[in-house]
């Protein structure tokens, strides 16, 4: 396959950690985006690596049994470790890593702790099979204070740190989801909702946590449900159902992403695009819910934006004492069964000791999406789009690949519309500031000039000046 065809790639600077073995356990903290490698229960060392800090945190803990879960508070000041089904231990992180631990047992009798989530530098939530318990950790007093609790039967849970929302699965088929929102010492119960199970000719299967994800897409929180269809049904394949989860009010089913295949899938969200990985074919597809889909009166149905493609091949460099100068790097096994995905854009291979960020490559999409109007709609929503948009403008005006006049008009109309929106927002901001002179204007936010805003200077410098140069060269 031509390298220009790969529109997804793994980050070129992955986080490296000691791979999982019988003596080394690996944990991932979704809030701090940190990988913990715990050797022999911590007695022979704990190494913590995050995406930003290239200097890992290393320390030792007394081996008090198998570690089930381990996470730092936001800011890395307090370490929480779960070793039993009833208790979480806390260690205040000071320079000498004092081993003076203090503990908190879950308050509900006969409950079993499924896990815990830090929601701030000093607040933590225990999720048990019988509900949730919200605590404040008083580090200086080495004590823990219960703020609020809620009894509810829990099958499994999920946490979205970007929105501070915990999703609890309840009911016998795991399809009733109860969200809670946490902020500044408060716990708010949101409206629960029921996930629509696929029609089946056999016994109803329970919803697995592997089939649910939470992610922020275009500034809105969604619950993504990977709905598999029974092989006996006439459905063409699995689909991803997107439920919009507002802070207040009921959850609403908004979008359905048609996968047109069956098998094992995994989900990521990159640059507001839903990426669906398919293990059987070792390919991925992307969906953009901002692009026009087919509205059936209730929800919008979307097909993949582009044909399925593999993630760009990745080579693992050989390092360590066995490395030989000039030795060829090893090809990484993509879509491995040992891969674990985390939201929004993380892929971890515990067996190889790598954490990657998934990235979108825009340039190959220019060749794969032939409808230039739809291509422009797609590019205008992307974070790093300016250079690619300008290259498309150059291409459609070039002698070799010149597009028909209506296509050129469509592209420039879309660019002008985006520019106009920005100018209007800037004008409204200026008026708001002028009218609030002498009063606090902290609530008035200046519009951010994103890469999709292309003005006359950009267009002349990068696209139209070429034609001036051509004209001058012909005259001389």
Image: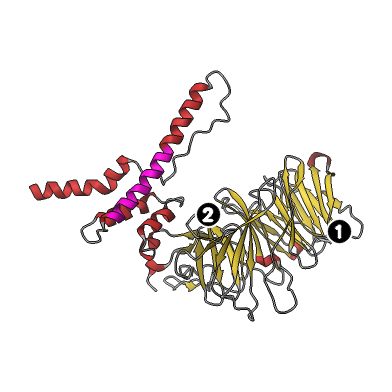
Q: What separation in Å lies between label 1 and label 2 (alpha carbons)?
A: 39 Å
Q: Residue at x 71, y 64 (%)?
A: 39
Looking at the image, which residue sits at the far top? 438
Label 2: few (<14), some (14–19) or many (≥20) C-alpha neighbours in 10 Å = many
Q: Which mark is residue 272?
A: 2
**Residue 451 position (above or below residue 347):** above
**Residue 440 position (above or below residue 214):** above
Q: Residue at x 40, y 68 (%)?
A: 5
Of residues 318 and 223, the one nearer the viewer is 223
Looking at the image, which residue sits at the far left? 476
Of residues 284 and 73, the one nearer the viewer is 284
Q: Which mark is residue 302?
A: none
- Examine the image and state in which quarter residue 461 appears: top left
- Residue 409 among magenta residues: yes
Residue 363 seen: yes
Of residues 422 and 125, the one nearer the viewer is 422
- Residue 381 coordinates in the image, percent (x, y): 46, 51
- Residue 428 coordinates in the image, percent (x, y): 47, 31
- Residue 430 coordinates in the image, percent (x, y): 46, 27
- Examine the image and state in which quarter residue 201 appears: bottom right
Looking at the image, which residue sits at the far bottom? 232
**Residue 335 position (above or below residue 28):** below
Q: Main secondary structure of the magenta part?
A: helix
Residue 354 seen: no
Which stretch appears magenta?
A: 406-422
Q: Is residue 464 left or right of residue 81?
A: left
Q: Upstream in the sequence, badge 1 or badge 2? A: 1
- Residue assigned mark 1: 86
Quarter of the rendering occupied by the N terminus: bottom left
Q: Residue at x 83, y 45 (%)?
A: 148
Q: Residue at x 73, y 45 (%)?
A: 182
């Amino acid at each position: 396959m031509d390298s220009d065809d790969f529109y997804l790639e793994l980050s070129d600077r992955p986080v490296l950690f000691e791979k999982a073995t019988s003596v080394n356990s690996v944990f991932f903290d979704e809030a701090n985006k940190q990988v913990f490698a715990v050797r022999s229960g911590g007695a022979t060392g704990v190494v913590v690596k995050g995406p930003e800090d290239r200097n890992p945190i290393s320390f030792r803990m007394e081996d008090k049994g198998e570690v089930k879960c381990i996470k730092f508070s936001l800011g890395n000041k307090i370490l929480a470790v779960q070793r039993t089904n009833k208790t979480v231990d806390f260690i205040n992180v000071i320079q000498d890593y004092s081993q003076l631990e203090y503990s908190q047992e879950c308050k509900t009798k006969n409950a079993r702790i499924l896990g815990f989530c830090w929601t701030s530098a000093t607040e933590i939530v225990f999720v048990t099979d019988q509900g949730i318990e919200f605590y404040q950790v008083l580090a200086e007093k080495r004590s823990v204070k219960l703020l609020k609790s809620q009894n509810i039967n829990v099958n499994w849970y999920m946490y979205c740190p970007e929105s501070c929302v915990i999703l609890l699965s309840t009911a016998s088929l795991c399809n009733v989801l109860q969200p809670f929102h946490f902020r500044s010492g408060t716990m708010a119960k949101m409206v629960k909702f029921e996930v629509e199970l696929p029609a089946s000719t056999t016994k109803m299967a329970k919803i697995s946590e592997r089939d649910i994800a939470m992610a922020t897409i275009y500034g809105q929180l969604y619950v993504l449900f990977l709905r598999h269809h029974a092989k006996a049904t006439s459905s063409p394949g699995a689909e991803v159902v997107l439920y919009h989860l507002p802070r207040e009010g009921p959850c609403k089913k908004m979008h359905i992403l048609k996968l047109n295949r069956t098998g094992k899938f995994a989900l990521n969200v990159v640059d507001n695009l839903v990426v669906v990985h398919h293990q059987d074919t070792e390919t991925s597809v992307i969906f953009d819910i901002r692009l026009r889909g087919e509205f059936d009166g209730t929800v919008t149905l979307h097909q993949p934006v582009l044909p399925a493609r593999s993630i760009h091949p990745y080579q693992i460099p050989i390092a360590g004492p066995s490395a030989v100068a000039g030795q060829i790097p090893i090809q990484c096994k993509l879509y491995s069964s040992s891969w674990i995905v985390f939201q929004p854009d993380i892929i971890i291979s515990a067996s190889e000791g790598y954490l990657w960020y998934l990235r979108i490559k825009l340039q190959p999409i220019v060749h794969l999406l032939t409808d230039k109007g739809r291509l422009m709609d797609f590019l205008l929503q992307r974070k790093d789009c300016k250079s690619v948009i300008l290259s498309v403008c150059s291409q459609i005006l070039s002698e070799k690949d010149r597009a028909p006049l209506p296509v050129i008009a469509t592209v420039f109309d879309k660019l002008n519309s985006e520019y106009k929106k920005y100018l209007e927002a800037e004008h409204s901001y200026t008026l708001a500031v002028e009218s609030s002179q002498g009063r606090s204007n902290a609530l008035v936010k200046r519009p951010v000039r994103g890469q999709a805003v292309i003005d006359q200077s950009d267009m002349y410098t990068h696209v139209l000046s070429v034609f001036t140069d051509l004209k001058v060269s012909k005259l001389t």
